[in-house]
Structure formats: C-alpha cells, structure tokens
Amino acid sequence: MASSIFFERVYAVVRQIPYGRVTSYGAIAKSIGAAKSARMVGYALNNASALEDVPAHRVVNRKGMLTGKHHFSGTNLMQQLLENEEISIENNCIQNFEKHFWQPPLYQD
C-alpha cells in the first residue's frame, strides 16, 4: 500500500472519531487492514497537524497515554484539546480509558 493511500485511510478513520472519544494507533491500523502498522499510523498523524479536519489529538497509545503530544504546538495542547472534550487526563494518561475508547469499523474494499 503506497504511503499516501495509507495516510489517507488513516485520516479517514481519524475523521470518524466522535467528539469526547479516543482510539489507538493499533485500532486504526487494524481497521484499515494493516494490523501490524501502528507505528506507521503514528507517522501519518505526525503529518496531520497541518490538516484542520483531522482530530489527531483523539489518537493515543493502547494504554491511553498521550504519546503523540510532542507533535502538537504548545506545551500541553493535546491534553487541553482532550480536556475541552471532557476527557480527564492525569500524568499524560486518559482516565477511564475504556469508557472513552472508540473502536473504529473495519475497512471494507
């Protein structure tokens, strides 16, 4: 899968994450049929900061940690965006992660 197609599939899934919910890099990778490509999902989201319609702040690691926060401008922008959606963060980790987790649908060709 060419990286631009891969990136677009990632962005399409991220655009579906509901307000006040989060998902993980691995869940996105599985949903687009690339289960072992969670790291590539992260690379795709590194480039998403320039895309206003891709809520990359809603993607965290499988434990609910804000591992991508250094890709957002400002000191705590990712945390602030999540807190604005009423998601509690403590020590860079989402509280009640299971409650806020959104499982993306599986990709269909």
Image (tube, rainbow, N blue to C red):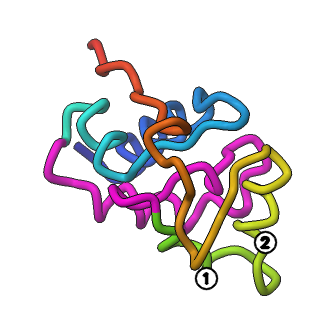
Q: Quadrant of residue 91?
A: bottom right
Q: Where is residue 43 drawn, in percent x and y?
A: 42, 66
* Residue 5 placement, left or right of 57: left
Amino acid identity at mark 2: Leu
- Up-down: is 4 above or below 19? below
- Up-down: is 73 above or below 95? below
For image coordinates 36% across by 60% down, the residue present is 63
Query: Circle 2: is it few (<14), some (14-19), or many (20+) Cα within 10 Å?
Result: some
Residue extending furthest left?
Answer: 36
Q: Could you say whether the residue bearing mark 2 is in a helix, strand or loop?
A: helix
- Give the labeled residue for mark 2: 77
- Residue 47: numbered disc: none
Amino acid identity at mark 1: His
- Give the labeled residue for mark 1: 70
Query: Circle 1: is it few (<14), some (14-19), or many (20+) Cα within 10 Å?
Result: few
Q: Where is residue 32 drawn, in percent x and y?
A: 30, 32
- Up-down: is 76 above or below 7? below
For image coordinates 85% across by 51% down, the residue present is 84
Front residue of this view, candidates 74 and 54: 74
- Quarter of the N terminus within the rendering: top left
Residue extending furthest top?
Answer: 108
Q: Where is residue 24 drawn, in percent x and y?
A: 40, 49
- Magenta-drawn segment: 35-64
